[in-house]
Amino acid sequence: MTSVKNWMVGLAAGAAAMGSVSAVADSPKLSIDKQSQTVQTPTSAASGMTYQATGAQTSTLTVYTEGYLLCGNIGSDQTPVKLELAHEDQSSQQARRWALPSALARSFSYASGGLVINPGDSLSSLVCHSLGVDGSVASGLREGIFDNGYDSATVSNYKSLVNWIPSAGFDWNSPDWAEVPQDPCGWSTYDEARAKEDVACAAVTGISAASVRAPTMLTGVTHGVVFTYVFRVDARFGAPPAGQNGVLRTPLLNALADPDATPTSMQVLVQDAYDSTYLSASGSYCTFATLPGTIDNNICNAAGVTAAPLPASGLLNIPFAVGQQLPSPVSQSFYVAVNRTIAGAPQLNGGTPIVVASILVDPVVSAEGADDFRGDNAVFGFMPSSSGFPWMGGNP
């Protein structure tokens, strides 16, 4: 590890504006909305944290994190700080930088080895989802309740990633995914859920070639030129009617949530991030309701499916709204496929991800109790030959 001084390079200007900086911890922590990440020591940059004033009232804060911090903005407010998040996959000799969405923050503070984004700000447009380098979440539940500390990593992580209480005899060390509810926001899950998400639900999940739920995305490589990944999106506003699961249908994109003081709908944002050593920013995506039989670069050429180029940022960005006047809930479920041009050599470590997708929920609705289960807010994709993170195979 480099010295703490490296982390402070570039932060002096921001720190001066906030007052003097006290003693610095050996491993600075980044905190956003009760979520924490250790600041990473990068190999491709001089510092894990840098700050630059870009105007009289604006600035850019760049932070490398040990794990994956996926952030975005839903709604608008005064956000003068651009938050550039970064991460290096350091599992092999050659570090591989990831491309992550940037976001906007109102403010930040630094003291005693801690960098806090939006300190004391209970509600802003900034929303984040934090995952460990092994794809784990601290707790799937909003209130941070932890499972039995004697569970294996496989059992503990799966409990935090699936909002479901299995029946007697089900074993997460050797799971039968056909038994796991496929629709994370439907009645079948709600009826057997650890957290009853009666205000609203949002999830991105994997799907298998057999059209049952899976812990990771479906992926494919076409002629060594295009990498394709597929995942499922589910969102619901209100509690599900008894016996009713989501109907797969393509979303109405860019729809805005109801601005009323009492929320009657929820704005949702789906994003991705990827290993930029292997994949490029060039590509396309599509949404559809029927899972195709082949995962390749023709996935968006099916009848009734329309492909669109990825945004200029090179990152997937799908905003949509779900909900209507209470008490009638609305559910939305669909698949997303992304085709990215391959730019370099793949990661040889099969247990290391290539891509990740996340879903972020309107913080106004979250404050009312929406999205009580956070463990299914992200899903990873790996090389087609990989079974995922080591713990996904029942390894402790």
Image (cartoon, rainbow, N blue to C red):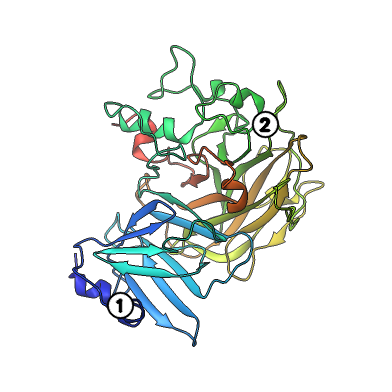
Give the image location of residue 230, x and y in percent.
60, 45
Mark 2: which secondary structure?
loop
Q: Which residue is mark 2?
A: 239
Q: Which quadrant, please, contains the N terminus?
A: bottom left
How far across and down, in percent of the image, does residue 109 sit? 36, 69
Picture coordinates of residue 348, whole percent (x, y): 36, 52
Please determine whether, in this image, residue 163 is positioned above or below residue 118. Answer: above
Which image quadrant for residue 330? top right
**Rendering quarter of residue 199:** top right
Whether label 2 touches label 1, CB < 8 Å: no
Local packing at callout 2 (Cα closer than 10 Å; few below 14, some 14-19, many 20+) is: many
Label 1: state its secondary structure.
Answer: loop
What kind of residue is marked 1?
Gly
Image position of 187 (left or right of 69): right
> What's the residue at 32%, 81% (across, down)?
16
| Residue 362 appears in the picture as rendered | no
Q: Residue at x 62, y 54 (%)?
A: 269
Q: Nearer the viewer, residue 274 or 210?
A: 274
The tag on residue 59 is none
Residue 318 visible in image: yes
359 displayed left or right of 319: left
Camera-side mark, 2 or 1:
1
> Residue at position x 41%, y 65% from top?
86
The percent position of residue 107, horizontal first and vertical second, equals 45, 70
Image mark count: 2
Q: Amino acid at mark 2?
A: Ala
Q: State the mark number for residue 19.
A: 1
User: What's the distance in space between the residues labelled 2 and 1, CA to CA?
Assistant: 47 Å
Residue 232: quarter of image: top right
Query: If you read the primary sequence from the N terminus, does the residue marked by circle 2 or circle 1 appear first?
Result: 1
